[in-house]
Image (tube, rainbow, N blue to C red):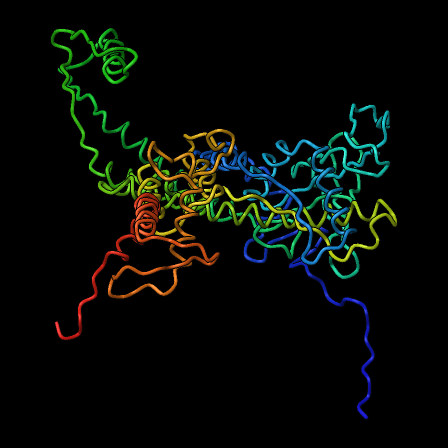
Amino acid sequence: MAEVPIVEFVEKGSSTSSAWGTLISSIANTDFSWPEIWEEFDEIRRTNPEVTIVRMLYTSTARDVNLKYEPPADFTPEDEEFTDFLNSCLADIDLEKFKETLITQVPLMGWGVWEIVPGLRVEGWKAPDGEIWESFNTDGLIGIRKLAWRDQSTLEKFKYNDVGNAEFMVQRVWPAEAVDLLLANCLHLMYGDQTIPTGLSPFQAVTRLRRIKHALEIVQGMGFEHAAGHVKFTVKGKLTDEAKVQLEETAKALMTAAQGSYATEIEDQFEFDLEDVTFSAAADLLKTISYYGMVILQIFASHFIAVATTADTGSYSAASDHSAIYLAAFNAIMGGFAKQTGRQLARYLRLVNGDKFKNITAYPELKASEVKKVVDLSNLAQFLTAFSGVFPMSEDDAAMIRERSRVLPTEQPGGGEDIVKAKAAPGFPTEAEVEEALSLITNLENVNPKGEPTFVTTGENQAVTEEEIAAAIDVFNAFCDEFYPKFRGLLEAKVKNAGE
């Protein structure tokens, strides 16, 4: 019999790349150590033009995202109750503020921490710190009063447990004393690399591109300054003191735009000419600078904004296609953050409420609604024309089409009337007439193939004349003409014999 191995329920080793001096350091480049790198990263986030564009894009797109908990598969009544409780906790906090802070910080800086501030859901309860807050729920449970952002600039260090997992964020806001924030009581989101508490910021790549681009912009500015030309003076004999002063004033007046281009020549002292200088490298410099700006946008899948700078033709179609890539990336980013947020908040709320939710079978999942691309109305009309000729359209289909059009109201005409009734024109068969015609056609028996007068019956043994059959077929054909034109074409199609 094989010996049963001894299982040690402990973790050995460390999950951090380096924790020397309790600071996080990147393996690739120690210049990107936190918290020292915050100042440069924050400058990029605030002042870099390309990153500012991305930040504005993220902010505006995030406003269309809705966050909602969904119960796990095969959920029990306890799971459903916990899911409803979590969604009610989300309703108690400022989600719009949270989303905007999240999307403008974490995907750019690489990480972010919010302190989870609890609140008692009891009528009349007041926060110990005097903050005005009241839940719309009075079930006596502990909810979330707010998610309080803790800026990366206040990070002094992380404290780790024995196996190298971050346990505390030490926050210092000078001149106050340092505060140890237990990460189990915080929402700690990471982006790019979840094995280290500071994630992996895309600004590490942007920093290099930004420096190269900035140097080229300086060269470009100096080039344009020199391309303004220069003044060539020809001195005749020895200059008097008065002539020297006049020469300096002449040079300054001619070469400074704000002074104006004028001069007074002193007889027999000097003469001057303006020499033009060609800046031959200007076009190449501008193209290179634009290239590095485009690469920065590509890091964030936002290059569709500047696609017209790289192509003279097809810019609209290219931008349209690339915007779909941006939305796919954005939805994936928000989906990942929603999973991190949902699991951490659910774990915290279950813990602080004791045995209330001890019987749940799994944690509900926080889902972020996807932001859909705006569909061109002409493309939507073409799709609708092709779709309606093949498949019947339900009320849900029509409501979705109205919503995606962004023009039509989402409500159906008459408060949700049946689509057949809404489309019916004068003289068009009613729904009851169509059903009667279908009943006559589908229940026919013993029809004489030679077309001779035959007594036929329906499923209810009711006598039907050939005139009634013809009338029913006419009603059915009218219905097909309106809703199933392709099916009507198949009914009237003639099949060739193999010998023809």
Say if residue 346 shows up in the picture.
Answer: yes
Q: Position of residue 298 (x, y in %)?
A: 41, 46
Is 348 on the left-hand or right-hand side of 325?
right
Q: Position of residue 454 (x, y in %)?
A: 31, 61
Q: Position of residue 222 (x, y in %)?
A: 31, 31
Task: Give the residue displayed 38% in from the left and 35% down from the top.
Answer: 423
Task: Give the residue displayed 35% in from the left and 59% down from the top.
Answer: 455
Is 110 on the left-hand or right-hand side of 53?
right
Is 419 on the left-hand or right-hand side of 183?
left
Say if residue 386 shows up in the picture.
Answer: no
Q: Quadrant of the C terminus?
A: bottom left
Find residue 94 and report its image quarter: top right
Which is nearer the eye, 326 or 12? Answer: 326
Q: Establish if 190 lies above or below 4.
A: above
Q: Establish if 199 lies above or below 406.
A: below
Which is nearer the eye, 266 or 87? Answer: 87
Find residue 450 and report its image quarter: bottom left
Is 461 on the left-hand or right-hand side of 338?
left
- Mark count: 0
